[in-house]
Image (spheres, helix red, strand yellow):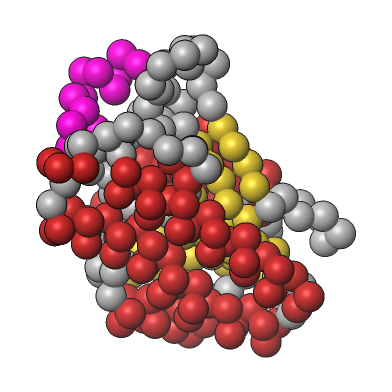
Amino acid sequence: MAITTEGKLAGQVALITGASSGIGLAIARAFLNEGTDLVVVARRSERLQALADEAQKHGRRCAVVAGDTREEETAARAVQTAIQQLGRLDILVNNAGIGRYADLIGTSVDDYDAMMDTNMRSTFLFTRHVVPVLLERGAGTIITIASMAGVMGFAGEAVYCATKFAQVGFTQALDRELRPHGIKVGVVCPGGVKTEFAIGTGRTEEGVSESGMLEAEDVAAAALLMATQPGRSRIAEIRMRPMVEPLFGRDPA
């Protein structure tokens, strides 16, 4: 990772959930390259620390918060870490998420709870704890990484779609609620992305690697575009699709 000495987000602090791999890690690196200091959150502390060490070598600050994003204590601790260790908080990226892919009758109540809590509950918790900080400042950006499964239904993904539709609706409502206070709220809806997440339950590593899915860096570029809009402009939603998607039939969300 080649990090510049200055950037479009120089002096700002971003909190990113699910930052230990995949899209979250790509977003963290993209933001670091534009001058952002970070608070990164995930359960795999060793991966977060590797990212923090990488950032430090290039003169960036990166605070690690190891914890379960489904728990309110983790969200509260992450926001407190941003304020106490880095002195401010400007951007929240709600990226933590999981997918378990199966027909409805093959989806258990535990699957439902795991997806709803990881995808939507974490989005609510971190946003709920970040918003008071941004309201006090009268500025800031909240970005949620949802999915094309949040704007259209896919067979075999009914519950996953429900969690992603919830994230999109949550974002749309908060855009109207928070925009009068100077806070920008947007959602990125990518199609399938080549990450550990994409394998989920019901897909194979080989199938994902050989697919024409998006790369994590593609989604990171979209999040960066959303975060670097001038004060007069906001991007409410970005929908991303791979160039190779079929014209008809099922396509990975």
On screen, residue 228 above or below 251: below
Q: Can residue 5 be seen in this view?
A: no
In this orientation, which residue lies closer to the viewer: 201 or 12? 201
Q: In this view, does 90 lie to the left or right of 52?
A: right
Residue 59: image x %, image y %? 53, 56
Residue 107: image x %, image y %? 16, 46
In this orientation, which residue lies closer to the viewer: 121 or 223? 121
In this orientation, which residue lies closer to the viewer: 140 or 109? 109
Q: Can residue 130 be seen in this view?
A: yes
Residue 203 in magenta stretch: yes
* Residue that appears at 58% across and 85% down: 132
On screen, residue 39 above or below 167: below
Q: In the rendered image, which quarter is residue 69 located in?
A: bottom left
Magenta stretch, residue numbers: 199-211
* Residue that appears at 49% across and 38% down: 152
Residue 41: image x %, image y %? 35, 63
Q: Residue furthest right?
A: 232
Q: In this view, does 114 lie to the left or right of 7?
A: left
Q: In which quarter of the image is the C terminus?
A: top left
How many numbered discs, if any? 0
* Residue that appears at 15% across and 58% down: 109
Q: Residue furthest front?
A: 105
Q: In this view, does 23 lie to the left or right of 183?
A: left
Residue 145: image x %, image y %? 49, 50
On screen, residue 190 above or below 248: below
* Residue that appears at 20% across and 37% down: 102
Residue 173 in magenta stretch: no
